[in-house]
Image: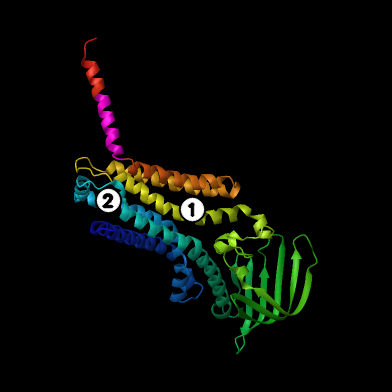
Amino acid sequence: MSIFERYVFRTTLGAFLTGLGLLTGVVWLAIALRQVDLMATKGQTLWIFLAVTGLTIPSLVMVIAPIAIFIAVLFTLNKLNGDSELVVMCATGMSGLRLLTPFAFLAIFGTGLVAATSLWAMPASFREITTQLTRIRADMLTRVIKEGQFVYLDNGFVFHYRERAPNGDMRGLFIQDRRESGKTQTYIAEAGRTIELGAQNYLVLEKGSIQRQADDSLDPAIIVFERYAIDLAQFSPEDSGPLRPRERTTLELLRRDPDEPWVRANPGRFRQELHERFLNPLFALVFTMIAFAALHQPKTTRQGRGVAIAVAIGIALSLRIAGFGTSAMLVRSESAIWISYGLPLAAFVLALMYVVVPNAPRLMATRQGAVRRNGARHRRSPA
């Protein structure tokens, strides 16, 4: 790149990083404030609070980065025009493609960032969030819940223990689970403790019984056990069970087993998640091209650029809303894949053609002026 191209790239990159940091920070703060109960009611440290809420940042970057690129390109081109630098470049014969070079490098950088976030960082962060929330539940059992209290860990789930032994074990446990409609399960045990095996946390009950009773039955089924383990993952805020689509790696989504019950029951959700991860990086390229096409032509201060900016924002906003709509269509129909990829690619090609065609805006204005002059000449000529 030339000196001028490096100058444009640095300016745009600085605006992009600033916008990305500010927008991500504001949205993250709004999300973090809703998770204050991690410290207030669940007895967690500030470090755990920041770790759990910080894991949402990759998903925010994935959505915000294309918007930040769009804003950065608009800002840089408007600044160059305001400082008359675009006019000078146009006077020296610099083509639109030559001016596009530093913005293309930024688009490649932004697309790579969004791709890495969408394909790798985001699913890894969601999986880690589930693990952390499970550990927080285990922490509540061992540190936060006081002896003698009846605590609602979840809607319909009650936990109680009589006292804590010197070795940390809980004694006299009572657990009632009524989360499943029409069925009640009651666990009674002499002792219990939480253990961690790999990434899983379990509550191990000793010398007790399980009473299972359906609402339409008078006689409960009683199971006596010497030792029984309960997976604490089922107490996470969202449904437990197999990994959800957003928690699976991209390779796992590509190699998903169609005979797996969870995949067979939700094929649309897996299809949607997989294609969204490849679609997200495209918007960084498309938004860069739309912003550049709108403002790459020099204009005087009298002409203004407000209309061009408004049009670019409207097109980008409409395209992103359409992207969310086609993403929802992917759940119901596999044929929506063509629409999902076709919309951003068509917008990119149209914006690129607008830039590549030499003097397209000027030719259009010249032709319109010629038509108006011919009309005026015919009106003045005698019949």
| Residue receiving disc 1 | 279
Q: Is residue 101 left or right of residue 262?
A: left
Disc 1 secondary structure class: helix
On the question of residue 309 being in view, the answer is no
Say which quadrant the C terminus sits in: top left
Which region of the structure is painted magenta? Answer: 358-372
Disc 2 secondary structure class: helix
* Up/down of 141 relative to 234, above or below: below
Q: Rate crowding at label 2 as few (under 14), some (14 to 19) or many (20 or more) other CA atoms within 10 Å.
A: many
Q: Is residue 338 magenta?
A: no
Q: Is residue 361 left or right of residue 163?
A: left
Task: Identify the residue shown where x is 62% and y is 80%.
Answer: 195
- x and y, in percent, of residue 4 in the image: 23, 57
| Residue receiving disc 2 | 77
Give the image quarter of residue 361: top left
Residue type at the position of mark 2: Leu
- x and y, in percent, of residue 379 in the image: 24, 16
Residue at the bottom extreme, as displayed: 166
Q: Is residue 365 magenta?
A: yes
Residue type at the position of mark 1: Leu
Q: Is residue 182 left or right of residue 139?
A: right
Give the image quarter of residue 139: bottom right
Task: Identify the residue shown where x is 60% and y is 64%.
Answer: 243
Give the image quarter of residue 54: bottom left
